[in-house]
Amino acid sequence: AFTPRVFSGIQPSGRLTLGNYLGALKRFVDIQNEGKYECVYCLVDLHAITVWQEPNKLRDNTRELAAFFIAAGIDPEKSILFNQSQVPAHAQLAWIFNTVARMGWMGRMTQWKDKAGKNSENASLGLFAYPALMAADILLYHATHVPVGDDQKQHLELTRDVAAKFNHDYGVDFFPITEPVIKGPATRVMSLRDGTKKMSKSDPSDMSRINMSDDADTLAQKFRKARTDPEPLPGTYAELKDRPSARNLVDIFAALSERSHDDVIAEVEGMQWGTFKPLLADLAVEKLSPISGEMKRLMADPAEIDRILGRGAERADAIASPILQKTYDLVGM
Ligand code: ADP
Ligand code: NA
């Protein structure tokens, strides 16, 4: 009974990585172009401020992220592209969900444990409540599907729990039980320095990640220095099972070239890393530099970016407002 609709978001918290591109944005573009879903894509600035953001930096990062979406292929006429804080219903529904979600659910989130660390007394209340806001983002549009990287799986389960508890408590069938869509050859892009850790903008070593803003020489250097192991490339993908750093490079190659793992392995079987890495670097330059070039061009006109986001917020609000009003009504407000 629900319209097939996709929602997903990325935080404007600076530095966009190849993980954000392959795990999230590239797939948002593919889904948009498939044409099977109405697509709602959000720059989640309310999420970003759960850890400190310098105000002027946040403003710049928000525009840069919008430019990234558009440069990567999101068409703001086809998809709805907007900034979270411009649609007040996100914060309003999040408050309702703060009363639905349980403390215990939040305390079990591994991202909370990782980000708050041992000093959780000093973490913001917003960081703890983050998954309830994320549930609001998704359910405010009655989104049926959410494409995300593997790291967001647990938060998606919590979104489903919130929807189910709300429906149960109020005796309705109002919110959909949203499906996560975790697919593709690189749902989890790993650090170039340690294949057991996720590639992240917060890793202290810049050599561990590919930034969308890296130039061709930097890309080549980072891939050349990427950690591997002494063995050459194997004859089957399954043989990479216990070779996380090696497997990561094959995953990245497959995702960038839009080919299957098996297809890539068939081509590079037996190759030494000294031969494979330059191929990977060339592929990355070919696929990523048009995006960073287009981002620079778009960033030169911030007023135009603001106009696009303003229009996106109006379109988002037109879906969100009636759903918020109906929620208030069900709650007795
Ligand atoms: P980050 O996780 O880098 O702080 P976000 O929380 O804004 O950034 O994540 C935006 C999207 O990018 C999410 O869908 C997330 O799953 C995806 N993502 C981030 N890092 C990776 C990664 N290393 N591999 C795959 N997907 C990732
Ligand atoms: Na994340």
Image: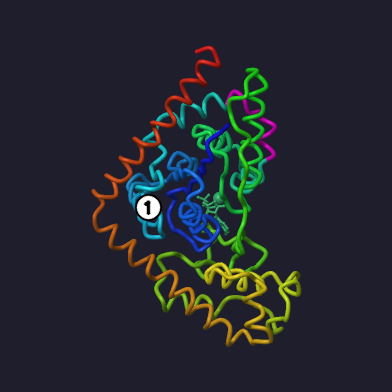
Could you tell me residue 320's position as x and y percent?
A: 44, 30
**Total of numbered circles in the picture?**
1
- Residue 266's x, y, as percent? 66, 80
Q: Which residue is the site of mark 1? A: 75
Image quadrant where residue 313 sits: top left
Q: Is residue 132 left or right of residue 56?
A: right
* Residue 312 in the image: above or below residue 247: above
Vertical placement of residue 170 versus 2, above or below: above
Horizontally, residue 104 falls left or right of residue 254, namely right
Over which residues does the magenta segment extend?
Answer: 98-108
Magenta stretch, main secondary structure, is helix
Position above or below: 230 against 303:
below
Residue closest to the eye, 140 or 119: 140
Q: Sort mark 1 into few (<14), some (14-19) or many (20+) by Cα contacts within 10 Å.
A: some
Q: Is residue 230 left or right of residue 276?
A: right
Q: Nearer the viewer, residue 223 or 58?
A: 223
Report helix, strand or loop for mark 1. Answer: loop
Is 105 a magenta residue?
yes
Residue 142 located within the stretch drawn in magenta: no
Q: Quadrant of residue 294?
A: bottom left
Can residue 124 be seen here? The reply is no
State whether residue 158 appears in this view: yes
Ligand 1, seen in the image, is in the quarter at: bottom right
